[in-house]
Amino acid sequence: MDLDSKQLYFKEIYTKEADNIFRFVFLRISNKEESVDITGEVFYKFWQIVCKEEVSTPRALLFTIARNKVIDWYRKKQTKSLEAMTEKSEEDENVPFYFQVEDEKADKDIVISAEASWVMEVLHSLPPQYKEVVSLRFIDGLSPQEIGEVLHITPNAASLRINHALEKMRKELGINIKDE
Amino acid sequence: MNNKWQKGIKDLQKLSLSKKEKQILLDKIFNELPKKPVISTWVSPFVMFKSHVTAFVVFILLVAGSSISLAAESSLPGDILYPIKISVTEPVRGVIKISPEEKIEWEIEKAVRRIEEVSILVTEERLDEKKQEKAEELFEKHTENFKVRSEREIEKHKIEEEGKQDAVKENENDKGKAQIKEQENERNFERERKEVEDKVEELKKAKGKALERNKKEKESKNNPSYRSDNND
């Protein structure tokens, strides 16, 4: 693939997946501005990889990068708060971000519906490993194969974990959902 | 309950970037990122060889190459590695000698090495006509090189001195002094040339001795009476 067709390929994937990645990040760090930044970073990394090699499962790759970025973000936050505890004078120091999107609408708070926040509550009540597969499966719409790739497990293990989670939800919360 | 779940999921899926945000982000990515794939031009020696096989082969060649040249250094005429010593390791060592003095010394050393080789062959009783011819030929070559190089240097030296003398003449306007100096210099050159010739002579004598010894030993070997005496 030459550079032009790579750019086209990248743009195509970006238009399809940018919202999904943004949502994935936003639901995990609940900060819109930073979510936009991280979305940019994810696609930046993705572009670098596309330039270097052929990508067979772009969606799984994007979610893997996004997941790692979120983990990094939490790590950074943790060290920052530790530093803040020991040195209160440097509390306000901002971590510089690569991307700064200026949009008047960007600052508007995202309001989510009562049902949506209820779903989030349900997810948070689940054990971490179930929370992750359920949100990847139902909110992000990833296939068990893709989930397996993101979480570094086999597709079968991913399916199994989803079924266990659904069973738990049905038994303990009375929510009966089927995985089509 | 299920409907509530479905609606909640749908609402969550509506979360998205605005069109403007998306476009700005895309522009940023394309503007700020290099247009070409980011591949470092610096290649680490550890990752230079992508496959382990090539790395291994290069490693073996390096090890083998260095040990062969080491072994070649101590080889004698008639050995398999001797041509490597003559046509590879010695010229390579010669390249390292930069100053003309060093180069001249290296020529002498090479001539001495030929004599040493011949004397070792003699003591080991392995010298034959062919080897001897080869050693003589190389010895001639080295001494010739030595002569040419040292004469060239002396010539150079002379020209330089003359240049200096001209300057001295102009400055001092003292012809007598210059003449005396010139004579002194000429004498110096004469002495240097003699030293060079003496050295060549010395080397030739050393070689002659080695050959003589060799001849004697050969004769004693070929002497039938000596042999029959021994056999009886």
Image (cartoon, coloured by chain):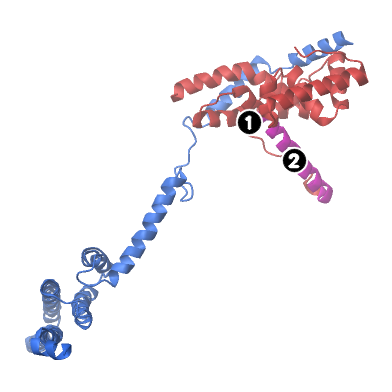
Residue A84 among magenta residues: yes
Q: Position of A174 compared to B117: left or right?
A: right
**Residue B185 makes an appearance in the image:** no
What amino acid is labelled 1 in the image? Glu
Residue ID for mark 2: A75
Could you say which disc has been placed on residue A41 in the image? 1
Q: Earlier in the sequence, mark 1 or mark 2?
A: 1
Amino acid tagged 2: Arg
Side of B100 where B66 appears, left or right: right
Chain A drawn colour? red
* A180 or A66, nearer to the observer: A180
Question: In this rendering, is residue A58 above or below B144?
Answer: above
Q: Disc 1 vs disc 2: Cβ atoms closer than 8 Å?
A: no
In the shown orientation, is residue A70 left or right of residue B128?
A: right
Residue nearest the observer in this picture, A64 or A87: A64
For image coordinates 25% across by 65% down, the residue present is B81
Q: Position of residue A140 (x, y in %)?
A: 72, 19
Apparent colour of chain B: blue
- Most common secondary structure along the magenta stretch: helix
